[in-house]
Amino acid sequence: MSAESASDIPKGQVDLLDFIDWSGVECLNQSSSHSLPNALKQGYREDAGLNLESDADEQLLIYIPFNQVVKLHSFAIKGPEEDGPKTVKFFSNKEHMCFSNVNDFPPSDTAELTEENLKGKPVVLKYVKFQNVRSLTIFIEDNQSGSELTKVQKIALYGSTVETTDMKGLKKIEDH
């Protein structure tokens, strides 16, 4: 469990940090010295001095696979008032997205972050669109000031795991 206060996590949900498949996590257009682990990994994301920063322009494309199926309820993104993300699009179970095709697919949900959200207030997603999530792609389209640099201090995803049936454990019923 992460070191967040219980009041930050929506009631009945857990921080999905422990269910991220770290070997498959990717971020396009990140600065090499200010990369995704600064905003996503426990310990790093609680350090206000560490950020994820965009490189060539303000956009970031983040791919997060999970090691089991999850239900995504809400998210929190912390960032500075000026350079924090503004328009954030979420895509459930869309793999191999890049900047050239991200606008070819309708997002599962879109959020316009406010100053209050950038301080860590969770944003509830369209829960029905995130029931069987194996991977999540987050497209940060722009930032609050319209500048070329986007900074993200923290990304937290809240939800629950999906109980799945172990098909190997089932026994075949004989016909009579």
Image: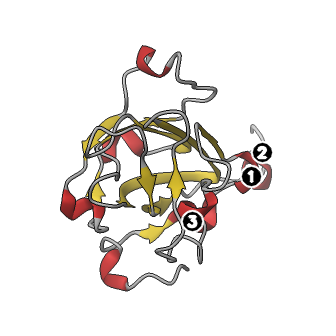
> With respect to residue 35, does 38 lie above or below?
below
Mark 3 — residue? 17
Question: Of helix, strand and loop, which one carries label 1?
Answer: loop
- Disc on res. 170: 1
Question: Of helix, strand and loop, which one carries label 2?
Answer: loop
Question: Of helix, strand and loop, which one carries label 3?
Answer: helix
**Mark 3, mark 1: which one is toward the viewer?**
3
Q: What residue is rendered at 51% in x and 61% in y?
A: 51
Is 118 on the left-hand or right-hand side of 46? left
User: Neighbour class for label 2 at 10 Å: few (<14), some, many (≥20)?
Assistant: few
User: Neighbour class for label 1 at 10 Å: few (<14), some, many (≥20)?
Assistant: few
Report the amino acid beneath label 1. Answer: Leu
**Which of 56 and 79 lies nearest the eye of the viewer?**
56
Residue 162, horizontal then vertical, whole percent: 52, 56
Position of the N terminus, as image quadrant, is bottom right
Mark 2 — residue? 172
Q: What residue is rendered at 80% in x and 50% in y?
A: 168
Which quarter of the picture shows residue 9? bottom left
- C-beta proximity under 8 Å, tags 3 and 1: no
**Which of 64 and 160 lies nearest the eye of the viewer?**
64
* Structural distance between the alpha carbons of marks 3 and 2: 37 Å
> With respect to residue 90, does 101 lie above or below?
above
User: Neighbour class for label 3 at 10 Å: few (<14), some, many (≥20)?
Assistant: some
Report the amino acid beneath label 3. Answer: Leu
Residue 174, horizontal then vertical, whole percent: 78, 42
Of the image marks 3 and 2, the number of the one nearer the N terminus: 3
Report the amino acid beneath label 2. Answer: Lys
Q: What residue is rendered at 57% in x and 26% in y?
A: 97
* Structural distance between the alpha carbons of marks 3 and 1: 30 Å
